[in-house]
Amino acid sequence: MSGPSTYEPKTGFTRWMDQRLPIIRLGYDSFVDFPTPRNLNYWWTFGGILAIFLVIQIISGIVLAMHYVPHESMAFESLERIRRDVKFGWLIQSMHANGASFFFVAVYIHMFRGLYYGSYKAPREILWILGVVIYLLMMATGFMGYVLPWGQMSYWGAMVITNLIGALPFIGDAIREWLWGGFSVGQATLSRFFSLHYLLPFVIAAVVALHIWALHVPGNGNPVGIEPKSKKDTLPFHPFYTVKDGFAIIVYLIVFAAFVFFLPNVLGHADNFIPADPLSTPAHIVPEWYYLPFYAILRAITFDIGPIDAKLGGVIAMFGAILILFVLPWLDTSKVRSMRFRPVTRVFFILFVLACLGLGWCGAKNPDDLVFAIGHDAEGVATGFKFVWFAQLLTFYYFAYFLIVLPVMGLIEKPLDRPASIEAAVLGTAKA
């Protein structure tokens, strides 16, 4: 916890302001003198990177909204006009499109760091839950933004995903028709998605503010998972972490700039540069890369589960893969936060990361394609292990990690000795 404020106004204006609206004091206590564990590594910098990219996305999105036309006969052409005729439109559009991908890269690293170092454990459960809420809002915002270019992949992606929502019992049809604004994806759908895509980033910003507030109550976690016990365990956030985070942000922005200027379209799908055509279905409909693991989980359920048919089962599995993160703080039974001291669970975590990457690979492939061939049938057609089977295997492990591995390993695994304090961890001295 940050403790009592140490801010002292130095000028007449700051003293006058501090008595009426202590916003300078709030900023000083939150981002200057905030006591931060002295052993944070570069994995912790992605929180700051996410804040920077949220600002980039909001500002670039506002500028694009000034020129975009949310009409099914003009949306595709309006994006081309932005790229070609609007001053620096090519730059702003490239920043917004690639910024979404870099935003998700940072958030996935941020989440995996939280999983590895146990950042979801008491007293940081609310902090973790707010983070999952932000992730869900990002998923919704990104999906609606993907529809706005009104290319082939945008149109048919909207058709597939909204139809899946219709599989939900009782409320599915009502939600689908509300999203459509009618009985099919069309003009009303585009208008709704544009409005929601413009609104949700401001909702995300509000939840981010709550997320930061929840962070400043218990304070930062740290790689060894031990709470600070004295002032020797912490450093003021400025200048130590402002400089460290600033360096990491600059490096990340340099990579981002390389995509913006030299590879502006490499992360997009070629079919989305074709205007939407309701009469021509693409050969292979895929979402943006950051949805591919969940798309693979959706398609992995090819069998009925009791009274639940395969389509509904896939939707439940897809949403369940995200919703399970809300109860993660209570699924992990270990009292040790960091997996640095849980060698066996660490192996399962590495397998979990590989499973997530594998699901992304499966999501980009045709389910009936072969991962590897083992022979040929009587007609000379190659036979082997299909991507849909691989996705089923990885989906099982995804859920087993949360529902079996973490609860069981927390009870049976004997953790390694931990340092007596953060200072001891940094200096490599006494163990607890």
Image (tube, grey):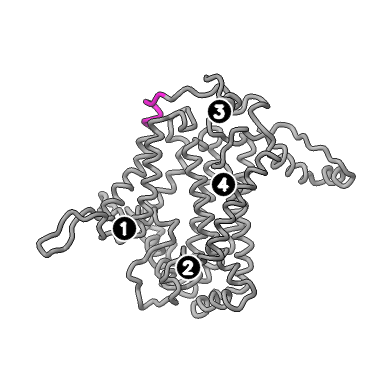
Residue 358 colored magenta? Answer: no
The residue segment tinted magenta is 408-414
Q: Position of residue 293 (x, y in %)?
A: 39, 53
In the picture provided, is 224 more to the left or to the right than 20? Answer: left
Q: Residues within 10 Å of mark 2 (few under 14, many from 20)?
A: many
How far apart are labels 3 and 2 at the CA level? 45 Å
Q: Earlier in the sequence, mark 4 or mark 3?
A: 4
Residue 412 colored magenta? Answer: yes
Viewer-proximal residue among 170 and 260: 260
Label of residue 147 in the image:
2
Task: Please give the residue where the numbered disc 1 appears in the rendered image.
Answer: 311
In the picture provided, is 303 more to the left or to the right than 28? Answer: left
Viewer-proximal residue among 373 and 79: 373
- For badge 1, the amino acid type reads Lys
Circle 2 sits in a helix, a strand or a loop, which is it?
helix
Foreground mark, 4 or 3, reads 4
Task: Please give the residue where the numbered disc 3 appears in the rendered image.
Answer: 226
Q: Give the residue displayed 49% in from the left and 80% down from the top.
A: 73
Foreground mark, 1 or 2, reads 2
Viewer-proximal residue among 401 and 213: 401
Please, is residue 372 above or below residue 277 in the view?
above
Q: Give the residue displayed 30% in from the left and 61% down from the top.
A: 366
How far apart are labels 1 and 2 at the CA level? 23 Å
Circle 4 sits in a helix, a strand or a loop, which is it?
helix
How far apart are labels 4 and 3 at the CA level? 21 Å
Label of residue 290 in the image:
none
Q: Residues within 10 Å of mark 4 (few under 14, many from 20)?
A: many
Task: Please give the residue where the numbered disc 4 appears in the rendered image.
Answer: 46
Q: Earlier in the sequence, mark 1 or mark 2?
A: 2
Q: Earlier in the sequence, mark 1 or mark 4?
A: 4
Q: Earlier in the sequence, mark 3 or mark 1?
A: 3
